[in-house]
Amino acid sequence: MGTTQLEPVPEPKYWQLKTVLSEALDSEFEVGEILPNERDLAARFGVARATLRQALEQLELEGRLQRRRGVGTTVAPPRVGVSLGTGPHIWPGGPDDVWQPVDCTTAVPSAAVAEALGTGRDESVHIVRRSRVSHGRPVAAELLHVPHSSVPGLSAIDASSGPARARAVLRDLRRLELERQENAVELGSAGTADAKELDRLPGAPVLVVTTRFVAAGGTAALSVATYRADTCRLTFGDSGGVEIHDGVQRKAS
Amino acid sequence: MGTTQLEPVPEPKYWQLKTVLSEALDSEFEVGEILPNERDLAARFGVARATLRQALEQLELEGRLQRRRGVGTTVAPPRVGVSLGTGPHIWPGGPDDVWQPVDCTTAVPSAAVAEALGTGRDESVHIVRRSRVSHGRPVAAELLHVPHSSVPGLSAIDASSGPARARAVLRDLRRLELERQENAVELGSAGTADAKELDRLPGAPVLVVTTRFVAAGGTAALSVATYRADTCRLTFGDSGGVEIHDGVQRKAS
DNA sequence: TAGTGGTCTAGACCACTAC
DNA sequence: TAGTGGTCTAGACCACTAA
C-alpha cells in the first residue's frame, strides 16, 4: 500500500479509497494484522481524516476490518457461518440448541411483540434472555417472549431467578408440539443492552432475526435475536459451509 | 418536534438525537411526510449538520427514513416482507418464480464463485441477471451463475442476447432435478451496478443472499442476490406476515 | 434557479487501551 | 502517559431535483 495519490475522477473519494484499501487488504495484509492509524493513513492518501474514516466504515460494514478504540484497526477474519436451523423444527432449549440461557424476567412486551403473540395490551409475558457463542466469541443476543399461557405449569410467583428460571420456562415450553417456525431477517442497529452483550458500540449494525414458534394453531413464543452483522453470515436450508461474497478472496491466517 | 435542547449527558449527541427523532417520527409524523431540511433540523437541536446527519443515517439504516438528494428526507413506510421460499424447493424460472430475467452474459466468475460451483479457474459460466420487484419497487438484483455443464443443451455460440437468452438458460436448467438449496444471508454494500438497479447510491447497505442450488450431488447453479436493506425484511420458513422490530410501532399511511 | 442531500476539509477534544 | 479510534464543529462546495 504505497503513498498512492487518488485519481481526479468524478467519483467520491471515500469510494475510491475503499476500493484501493480493499485491494491492499487482499494482497498485502494478513488476517489480524494492524493497519497504520487513521491520521497516518489519511495523510498518506492526501485526504481528511473524516473522509478516510468513511472508507473504513464501509469496509467494517462489509466485515473486512475491525476497529477498536484505544487499540487500532485490524484485518478481520472471514465471517463465521451461523446456522439458523430450519429443517427439523427446533424448540428452544432442545437437544441441538446452541443458545445459553442468561436470565428471565417478566414484563409487558412492546405493542408489536404483543400483537404477534396475540396477548392482551397490558398482559405480561416471560422474557428469557439468551446468548449465542461461536468460536469463543459472542455472536448473538436474544429475547425469547413466552406468554404465560404457553407455560401454564410454571408458578407465576416462582421466586427462582436468573438462569434457573430461564431453564424452567424452556423446559415447560418443550411440552408443546411445534407445528412450524416462521423466520424473518432484517437490518437493525444494536441498542445499548445488545451492544454490550455483543461487545460492540451502540448503533453497531446487526441482523435482527425474528422467529415465531407456532404450536397448536397459535404463536407459542416469539424470539427476537440480534446477530453481529460484521462477523456473521446466517445460513439456513442446509449446512453452513459456502464461502461466498462479492468475489473477494481473503488470505487465511 | 419542538426546539428541544439536548441534555448534557455523557452519551453521544447523535445517539440522543436519534432517539428523540425516532420518538417524534412515531408520534408526530405520517408515512411519506417530509421532514425539515438538515440545516434547519441541526439548528433546531443546536448541533452541527454532520452530527445531525449521523443520527439520520442510523434512522435510514433502520428503515425509518428515506433520503433523496435534491428532494428531501421523508418518513419511510414499514419494510416489506420478501419471501425467500425455502419450503418446496424452487428452481429459478419455475412457476412460482418472482424474478424477472434481464439479460445473460458469459464470463469467468470470481474465484469464490468458481470454487462454490466447482468449475475450473478460467472456466466461463453463464451469468443471468435478474431483478425482483415488489409493490412496484425494485427490491433486489441477482446474478445467477450457471456452469455450462448444467445446461448442455444450450449452444455455446447461441447468438440470442438479452432476456431471450436468459430465459433459454433458465428453461434448460429446469431439466435437472433439484435436491435442495442452501442459503446464506449477510450484510454488504451495493456496488455501482447493483446500486443503479436498486435506485440507491453506491455503498448503500444491502442484504446479500447467496443460494446454492444442489442437484445430482453437485452445485448446479449459484445465485448471489442483493436486497435493499432499508426497505426489505426477508422472510422464510413460512408466510411473510409478521411485523416486528425492536418494539417500534408506526402509523399507517 | 433555488433548495435539497452528498461530499469534503482542518481542525478540536474525549474515551479508551496498553505500557 | 502516549497513542488509538470516537465524537463534534463550522464552515465550503458539488450533484441533483423540481419549479
Image: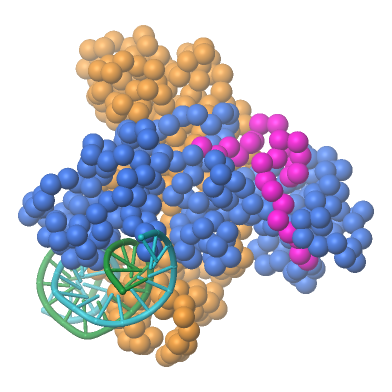
Chain colours: A blue, B orange, C cyan, D green
Which quarter of the figure is the N terminus of chain A placed in? top left
**Is residue B245 left or right of B186 when viewed as pictured?**
right
Of residues B76 and A159, the one nearer the viewer is: A159
Looking at the image, residue A213 lies above or below residue A10: above
Tell me where residue A85 appears, x and y as whole percent. 63, 36
**Is residue A141 left or right of B143 when viewed as pictured?**
right
> Which residue does the image show at 54% across and 40% down from the upper left?
A135
Q: Which region of the structure is painted magenta?
A: A81-106
Which quarter of the figure is the C terminus of chain A placed in? top left
Of residues B175 and A242, the one nearer the viewer is: A242
Of residues A78 and B127, the one nearer the viewer is: A78
Tell me where residue B141 appears, x and y as whole percent. 37, 40
> Which residue does the image show at 27% across and 51% down from the upper left?
A35
The number of callouts visible is 0
Of residues A39 and A250, the one nearer the viewer is: A39
Tell me where residue D1 appears, x and y as whole percent. 31, 74
Looking at the image, residue B72 lies above or below residue B194: below
Q: Is A99 part of what is drawn in magenta?
A: yes
Q: Quadrant of residue A115?
A: bottom right
Tell me where residue A42 appears, x and y as whole percent. 18, 60
Looking at the image, residue A31 lies above or below residue C5: above
Residue B171 shows up from this direction? no
> Which residue does the image show at 51% across and 12% down from the upper left?
B216
> Which residue does the image show at 75% across and 44% down from the upper left?
A93
Residue A191 shows up from this direction? yes
Q: Is B138 part of what is drawn in magenta?
A: no
